[in-house]
Amino acid sequence: MRLQALLFVLLIATTAASRSEVYKWVDEKGVTHFSELPPPGQAAARPRQQPAAPQQPLPTSATGGDDLRPAAKTWQQKETEFRQRQIERDAAARKQEEREEAAKRRQHDCMLARKSLEDLQNANAVSRYDQQGQRVYLDDGERAKLIQHRRQEIEARCAG
């Protein structure tokens, strides 16, 4: 009988301890404290309990408006959104790399066209190879046409 009474008292004590209130306060140093006893000479608040169940949509108001809370997202929805953001980020990175590569190609082509024009203008004699593989020297008219063609290439490739 004594054992049963002791167990009963112990059960009541643990139940009472689990129902005790928790106080929250911030000290003069800015540190937040939680305890079962309120701080002496200081105001303390009781922290709100967070609902354990996921949020349910509220019923619509009497005015007919939609007062629904957004439902919590499932992990599958979060995973899908994460993967979609990852795909979009990868696509944007690829586009950026392509733009940078195209800019490098344009810069390289511009440099080659300018070098070719410089060589044409500074050379004493300009030659090319014909269909039989023999060297043929260009006269002044052909050279002027080639220089004009190189300048047009520079304007097209080096614009912007």
Image (cartoon, rainbow, N blue to C red):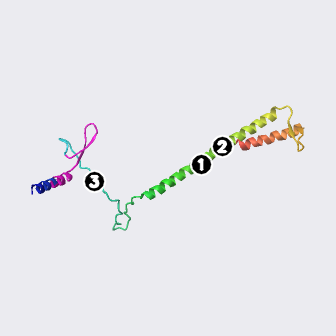
- Crowd band around label 2 with a 10 angstrom C-alpha radius: few (<14), some (14–19), many (20+): few
Q: Is the Cβ of the residue at disc 1 closer than 8 Å to that at disc 3?
A: no
Residue type at tag 1: Arg
x and y percent of residue 137 in the render?
89, 37
Quadrant including the C terminus: top right
Determine the secondary structure under disc 3.
loop
Task: Please say if 70 is above or below 113.
Answer: below
Disc number lying in front (2 or 3): 3
Quadrant including the N terminus: bottom left
Disc number lying in front (2 or 1): 1
The magenta stretch spans which residues?
11-36
Determine the secondary structure under disc 2.
helix
x and y percent of residue 98 in the render?
63, 47
In depth, the one of 79 and 4 nearer the eye is 4
Query: Residue 66 shows which numbered tag?
Result: none
x and y percent of residue 129 in the render?
87, 40
- 132 in magenta: no
Find the distance from the CA under tag 2 to the CA under tag 3: 58 Å
In depth, the one of 129 and 40 nearer the eye is 129
Residue topped by disc 1:
94
Q: Earlier in the sequence, mark 2 or mark 3?
A: 3
